[in-house]
Image (spheres, rainbow, N blue to C red):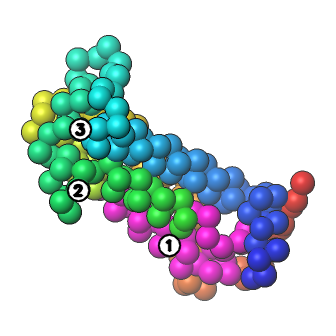
Amino acid sequence: MEPQQLSQELRQGKNPHMSRRRAIIGLSMLGGTMGQVVTLYQTGIVSHLPDPPVPIFDADRVDASNYAYSRFNSPDGPIMVLNYALTAWLAAAGGLDRARRNPWLPIAMGVKLVLDTAVSAKLAQEEWSENKAFCEYCQVATVSSIASLVLAVPEIMTAVRTLLGQEKNTPAEVKTQ
């Protein structure tokens, strides 16, 4: 696909898959922002993360714990940022009708979202197990992953049907503003 066409389709194209992809990109940006906030604390740029008045949340304790620094000799905040950037990239890759023209892109995004959701659930369990508290910023990111997976299912199914030869090969109607 030519860059000009890709630009137009991503910015102005309209169909249900693109609307959901835009939501996934937004949720990925939200998850990445949560990772940025945690990173600011974990690297000493800010000295405190505010919590809602709910006793199960203690971001300072969770994000300063051994759990939060136990992977790759790094705090986990920057890893969250990278992870959500990769998800946003997969959601943004390809044009309006990528499920039919390049079905491996939505399938790759779906696999990534399944992994994100499973890893987020496991990390939440570890957070609680070690700290008896949650980081609300991390849990916002977890909810973003779950919502993204749900939003991705229709496009993933179209891509799978395309690969199995069950989906029509006609491109989706391109509507621009």
Q: Regarding mark 1 in the picture, which secondary structure is present there?
A: helix
Tell me if mark 2 has few (under 14), some (14-19) or many (20+) residues whose alpha carbon lies within 10 angstroms of its own. few
Tell me if mark 3 has few (under 14), some (14-19) or many (20+) residues whose alpha carbon lies within 10 angstroms of its own. many
Read off the residue under disc 3. Answer: 63
Could you give the CA–CA distance between mark 2 and mark 1, rounded to whole angstroms?
30 Å
Which label is found at residue 107?
1
Q: What span is colored magenta in the figure?
A: 91-118
Left or right: 142 with respect to 14? left
Place of residue 101 in the rendered image (x, y in percent of width and height, measured from the top left)? 68, 81
Read off the residue under disc 2. Answer: 74
CB under 8 Å between callouts 3 and 2? Answer: no
Q: Regarding mark 3 in the picture, which secondary structure is present there?
A: helix
Secondary structure mostly seen in magenta is helix
Could you give the CA–CA distance between mark 3 and mark 2, rounded to whole angstroms?
12 Å
Place of residue 35 in the rendered image (x, y in percent of width and height, measured from the top left)? 39, 45
Could you give the CA–CA distance between mark 1 and mark 3, rounded to whole angstroms?
33 Å
Q: Quadrant of the C terminus?
A: bottom right
